[in-house]
Every structure is written in C-alpha cells, then in structure tokens.
Image (cartoon, rainbow, N blue to C red):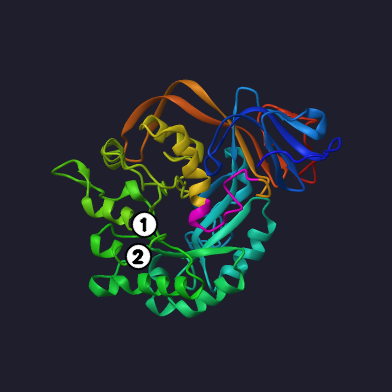
Amino acid sequence: MYASHGITAQEFDIAVLGGHVIDPKNDIDEPMDVAIKDGKIALVSKKINEKRAKRTVDAKGLYVVPGLVDMHAHGFFGVEDGHYLRNSFYAVSPDGFTFRNGVTTMVDAGSSGWKSFKTFKEQTIDRSHTRVLAFLNIVGEGMKGGAWEQDTYDMDAKLSALMAKTYPDLIVGFKVAHFRGDGEDYFVPIDRAIKAGNMAGNIPVMLDGKLEDDVLRRFRPGDIFTHTYGRPIIDTVTNKVKPFVREARQRGLIFDVGYGGASFMYANAIPGTKDGFFPDVISTDLHGGSMNAAMKDIMSIMSKFMALGMGLEDIITAVTWKPAKTIKRPQLGNLSVGSEGDVAIFNIRDGKFGFYDQQGEKMSGTKKFECEVTIKGGRVFYDLNGLTSPLPRVISGVPRM
C-alpha cells in the first residue's frame, strides 16, 4: 500500500493532499495523502510532496474515501413513453446524478433484461462517464412495467445467463422485482433468477419482493434483499426486528436500503436501527419518482443513517467496499494500490437539518454529508468549490486533465 523507491518528479497524475482518509478494506481511518497514476491508485502515504503530481486537490479538513458505489439505481433513460424504467423518461441519465454525489459506479437494478440489455449498453453504458454496471432483470424485456413483468414465459434462465456470460465485465447479477404471483407461482422468477446466477458463475440475485421466511430461505449467501426498510421487518408485538430476518443475515443474505420513492419508512428504520439492524449496503433506487422526493441522493441517505446512529466508518463501508464485494468487483470501493483511481471527497456540515420520509414522518439531525470533489479513473469530474489545482477545464462537455 505504501511508497516504492526511486520516484521521479511529477510521476503522479493527481494527488489528493491533506485529507482524512477512510478506506474500510484497508482499515485506514486517519490523515493520509492519495496519489493516482494512469487511472489507478498509485500511493497512499502520510505525506506526498505536491511537486510529485501534475495536479493536486486540497482536501484539508475534508474526508477522502473510495468512489461511491450506488448498488441500486435506474439509468436506462430513453424515449419510450409508458415503459416504466426500461428505455424510458422515468429513468435517469447517469452522469447528471452521480459525480455531484461522489458516485463513480452506478449499478442499474434490473431495468434491462436479456432482450433489451444491448440497447441499454449502446445507448447508456457506452456513452456514460460514470461506470455503469447492471443487474439483469429475469424478465427478458426488463422493467417495462405492468403485465410485462408478470409474464413467466419471458423469464428465461438460460438466455439470461448467456447474456451475463457474454458481458461479464458489465453484468453483475440478476434482479427479481414486482412479481405478484401467489403460492408456489411466486417462486418461479426467483428460482429462474437463481438458476441463471448459478449458470453465469455464481453471481448474485437481488430481490424486490415479499419479506417472508420461506422467501428468504430460497436465496444463497451473497444474494441481496432490497428495500429493507420499506418492508415489515419489525415484529409489532416486540418492536424488534423479526428473528427470521436476522437469521437470513446470519446465513449470508445482504440487506440493501434501495430507498426509492416510497421504499423507506421511519416506522421500520427507527425501531430497526435501535435494535442494531443497520443496512449492509446503502443505495438510492434513483429514478424520476425518487430524485426530488424524500430520497434525493445518496449523500442525503447517508445523512439519514448518521442521524439514526450509524457510525461514520460503517456508513462509508456501506457505500464503498461492501457493495463492491457484493457485486464481486474487488477493484472498486477501496484505495489499494492498483485499484481503480476513484475517489470521493466530502465534508460533513454541522447545523440543524430535517430528514423526512415519503410517509410524512420527519426526524432532525445535526450532521449532513456534502460532496466536494469526485475523481473517477484519475480524472476530476466534479469540484464544488474549486479545490483542484490547476482547475479542470471542460472541452466538448468532457472534463480534461
């Protein structure tokens, strides 16, 4: 992790100086400098001479962490009206919502299926500066809404797995969502998604569905339950987290926030966190119905969980190393030498802040996260207060080094 010898002048492309580094993977929580070369982390050291870098970022008084990984968002923006989150107006264009919040990797959560993924790739993934990865919907058409998502004939494990194996660098797992079947029929998309996950090399499955013991027992260690605090995790008699939910975590199920438009309720989050049940992963479920509502952005959600009593390092873990491990991308979410040169720099503002949920409940907090600078692959894509020297120039809409 630390310096090698024989270094020459200006061998780094960029150095982040004077900040407090939090890197959960490497157990770093102290003032450190970070240098990037050729798009990769090159050095993390107590002191890096600014003359060794072509440009610098003044991070004094700020926190420096790996680029954030938003593990649940919807970026398949398009022009097909009435198609919910698949190639639609209701999804979002990634770059407009990521860098200003420290996010360098967005994982689309099932907007596309095997039939529509290539369109998503050509239209969005290939055209975004944000690193866009994807959970593939088990429905071939993707998250098209309504009856399309109830069509079990369009849930093909083999073709889904084939698409994942064709694009293993982009597809990180499979998604099951919005299915309304009853009885044993309910398990059809789940079983097919798990089959696809096994066929594609044991990649994870994310469920947006029922919070029931027999449902959670269907899943493998490393699979994901999303919208955790929008589901009835609390036993109304004991006001504690239901035992089968804790047992599922002990078996290795990952619990994701997936905040969304109406998938987070203080009625669950307050007693849940008081009972010590904090999320494994903090994510947004970013889309047209959540971006201007109670959710807003990932920094807002991080602030809410700080107000709920979650520790700073645990919050950073939940937006960096934990989601990176969950999607099996160890080159992300950490500042190890050789990892992707993605860095988020933020301050924590002191003040009086109000945090509300979509049901109209509100709680107060005294701390709020605010992104200052975002670096992706060694390039500054966002600088709130001009902390980069020399300042980034924009040519043809692309920040230039």
Principal secondary structure, stretch drawn in magenta: loop
| Quarter-of-image position of residue 264 | top left
Identify the residue at image location x=44%, y=41%.
Answer: 295
| Quarter-of-image position of residue 150 | bottom left
**Residue 37 spot, x, y in % from top left:** 76, 44
Secondary structure under badge 2?
A: loop
The answer to whether one can see residue 73 in this image is no
Task: Point out which mark residue 319 bears.
Answer: none
Identify the residue at image location x=35%, y=32%.
Answer: 308
The N terminus sits in image quarter: top right
Secondary structure under badge 1?
A: loop
Q: Earlier in the sequence, mark 2 or mark 1?
A: 2
Task: Answer with left or right where residue 324 lies relative to residue 183.
Answer: right
Q: Is residue 286 or residue 232 the one in the foreground?
A: 232
**Residue 105 spot, x, y in % from top left:** 59, 50
User: Eyeballing the image, is 315 above or below 47?
Assistant: below
**Residue 92 spot, x, y in % from top left:** 56, 51
Q: How crowded is mark 2: few (under 14 residues within 10 Å), some or many (20 or more)?
A: many
Residue at the spot of label 2: 219
Task: Point out which mark residue 253 bears.
Answer: 1
The answer to whether one can see residue 307 in this image is yes
Asked whether the residues under the numbered discs 2 and 1 touch, taking CB atoms below 8 Å apart as contact, a structural biologist would say yes
Identify the residue at image location x=39%, y=25%.
Answer: 365
Task: Answer with left or right where residue 239 lies relative to residue 92.
Answer: left
**How far is mark 2 from mark 1, CA to CA?**
7 Å
- The segment highlighted magenta reads 324-336
Q: How crowded is mark 1: few (under 14 residues within 10 Å), some or many (20 or more)?
A: many
Residue, far top: 351
Amino acid type at image mark 1: Leu
The C terminus sits in image quarter: top right
Q: Does the magenta stretch include residue 325?
A: yes
Q: Is residue 69 or residue 8 the one in the foreground?
A: 8
